[in-house]
Amino acid sequence: MESETKSEIIDATNRVLCEHGYAGLTIKKIADESSMTTAAIHYHFDTKAELLNAYLDDLVEQFKSNITSEATDPRDRLTALLDTVFTSSNPDADGFPVAIMELKSQAPFQEVFRERFLDLDNMMRGVITDIVADGIDEGHFNEIDPNEVARLVTTMINGAHARKVALGEPLDETRRVVEHTLALQLGWHPGSEVVA
């Protein structure tokens, strides 16, 4: 029951963040979005920062499961990763990227937020590094430093989401640039896999 309660609070937090942003996020609004009272929410989370830390932990875990691919071929894994980061799971939920951007803007002031975003960044870079290293080992990709590729691609992904929020630029434009860059760096073109 406790897990379901926390999950309900986290889901309500997501809805309030998407609708009202960080500045408009209050325990009262979260209670209004859930079946909980403000006292019940405070029972589980002493502060707004503690609640948002749990929200970000949940986000990191969801993202981790989303970028984990069943594919064994590094080229397929790379395509699946790009599909995940450049495709909105819910195109109608435009508030979510804004909410995340607002939380990122709080990272310089909230050490716990910075730590969650570092976790997310390290996870993303680790996945990309592993994919590139495996692709090099299997002869699918050019010899290149996998860590450098991971840093570049992660930076481009973060930039793509910032450009979407701030400028309204579609994610597919940056995906095209990322794929072009990967073609130059790795000698890989999406969809060029040979089916045996």
Image: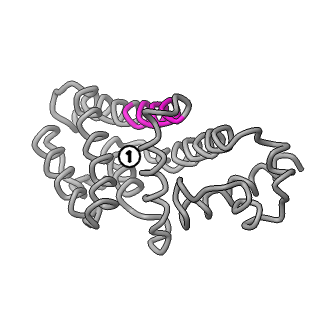
Would you call the spot at circle 1 few (<14 residues within 10 Å), some (14-19), or many (20 or more)?
many
Please report the residue visible at 20 percent of the width from the left and 36 percent of the height from the top. 141
Question: x and y percent of residue 96 in the render?
Answer: 49, 61
Q: Is residue 145 above or below residue 103?
A: above
Please report the residue visible at 81 percent of the width from the left and 45 percent of the height from the top. 42
Q: Is residue 64 above or below residue 123?
A: below
Q: Is residue 3 left or right of residue 48?
A: right
Question: x and y percent of residue 69 in the render?
Answer: 47, 47
Region rendered in magenta: 113-125
Instruction: Specify the color scheme.
Output: one colour
Q: Is residue 86 above or below residue 125?
A: below
Question: x and y percent of residue 9 in the render?
Answer: 74, 54
Q: Quadrant of residue 32?
A: bottom right
User: Callout 1, which amino acid?
Assistant: Arg
Secondary structure that dominates the magenta span: helix
**Residue ranking furthest to the right:** 1
Q: Which residue is mark 1?
A: 77
Please report the residue visible at 80 percent of the width from the left and 50 percent of the height from the top. 41
Q: How many marks?
A: 1
Question: x and y percent of residue 100 in the render?
Answer: 47, 51
User: For the residue labelled by badge 1, is the local secondary structure a helix, a strand or a loop?
Assistant: helix
Q: Magenta stretch containing residue 134, yes or no?
A: no
Please report the residue visible at 42 percent of the width from the left and 55 percent of the height from the top. 84
Q: Quadrant of residue 74?
A: top left
Q: Is residue 85 left or right of residue 9?
A: left
**Residue ranking furthest to the bottom:** 92
